[in-house]
Amino acid sequence: MSNQSQRLVTVILVGSAFLTGVDMFIVNVAFDEIGRDYGTASLAQLSWILSAYAVVFAALLVPMGRLADRYGQKTGFVAGLAVFVAASLACGFAPGVWWLVAFRSVQAIGAAAMTPASLGLLLAAVEPERRAPAARLWATTGAVAAALGPAVGGGLVQISWQWAFWINLPLGLLLIAGALRYVPDVRHNHGTPIPDLLGAAVLAVAVSALVLGIVQGNDWGWTSARVLSAFATTVLAGAVFARRTLRHPSPVIAPSLLAVPAFRWANTAMLVFNGAFGAALLAGILWMQQAWDYGALRTGLAIALGPLAVPITSVVAHRLFPAARPGPMIATGSVLFAASAIWQGTALSTTPAYWSSFLPAWLLGGVAVGLAVPNLLAAGTATLPPSQASTGGGVVSMARQVGLVLGVAVLVTVVDGAAPKTGFTHAWYAVALGMVLAAIAALRMDRVTPRLALHQPVAMTPVTHPLQNSTGANG
């Protein structure tokens, strides 16, 4: 493949990762406008616009990666991108909030299919010496999307919130056309077992029921039959998922992975860190729009400055501490984010004070994410053999998405129905507590994790596609 063709392939595959990242942040900024348009939708109902996407994406990420290995990376990528684009079009025409939630779930199916395939195709298309830089470029799109997404979304929402989804149509069709023409196919293993799609569905039910119980606890009553039934469903579905994990020939999470202590603690830290981060991101957006009466564009520009600190911190940390152990770096980032959250909760005021109160703490949070997330992703697969790096990377990304879902659910529970200042103050303190727990998990992980270079790409070979969406602040 010529250098020009490699560049085109890189643009197409990295562009797809950027598209899904931007879409997530556009939706965050459009959240308030969607609520106003649907009128009767409560905060708990609207939260499912974010949660349904993350739940489905998390549950299907690993199985879709294995299907792409079996039937072809290009087929999985193009099919996933087509589903994502079609669902984006449908989202803009959704007649009600639950229709929008349903279409977002379909959108997540497409994203789960195209994400692992895009990295697998990219690593196979470039020369061996360029695979690590290409993977870092693919991963860095998360940070760029986090920085540009809110601003782009704010501008689109000025037209209508529907354009937060419809923007995917022209961009997605262009990427599909480019992929069909320029991207070569890759099929790693024709004999890969059919993944446990039923197990993935059971996992989605377990997480969804847990989120339902948390989100509706205030409205339905924590001891009501509906809430207790939701929690019981979580336990039952969790037990079924555990049983299938032990017995299925190609489970969503291989039991051998869970036998690696460093892997368990890395996923625990990832889950808790991203739960706290997801709550913090939505809390900042909702506070500016609801308490300070910021419009979508102003909110998007205000939020964008924090994620800009993520790639800068990542690069600087790599140069200053190239051989640092991951645990202390993750713990440092988590503690800094906890300090940022306490700062936000203490300085919170209904009188707008963006430059003096919100932005300094928000920038500190961006620095914290830049220290923690790349190391979490690298450490999660550092102790795994190459044959398990692909699946391990997918499980780490799955933990990331589940954490975001639970963080949003807890935020909704804390702020819904409470006095604005009291509710959001408690929310920021809950974020700080979550980050302290993430720091503890990171230090536990470091006891059994070997020394590795900061942001070291793991198992970047043509036959694996670790899902390392690394420096992104999109949780």
Image (tube, helix red, strand yellow):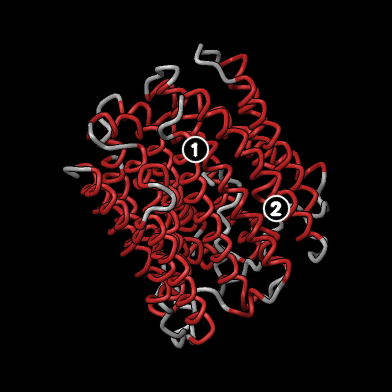
* Mark 1 / mark 2, whichever is N-terminal: 2
The answer to whether residue 60 is visible is no
454 vs 238, nearest the viewer? 238
Q: Residue 460 at x, y = what percent?
A: 63, 66
Residue at x-position 57% and y-position 70%: 390
Question: Label 1: which residue?
Answer: 414
Q: Residue 372 at x, y = what percent?
A: 69, 46
As drawn, 304 above or below 76: above
Secondary-structure class at tag 1: helix
As drawn, 360 above or below 408: above
Image quarter of residue 205: bottom left
Residue at x-position 41% and y-position 42%: 218
Q: Residue 412 at x, y = what percent?
A: 44, 40
Residue at x-position 58% and y-position 30%: 306
As drawn, 254 above or below 183: below
Question: Label 2: which residue?
Answer: 375
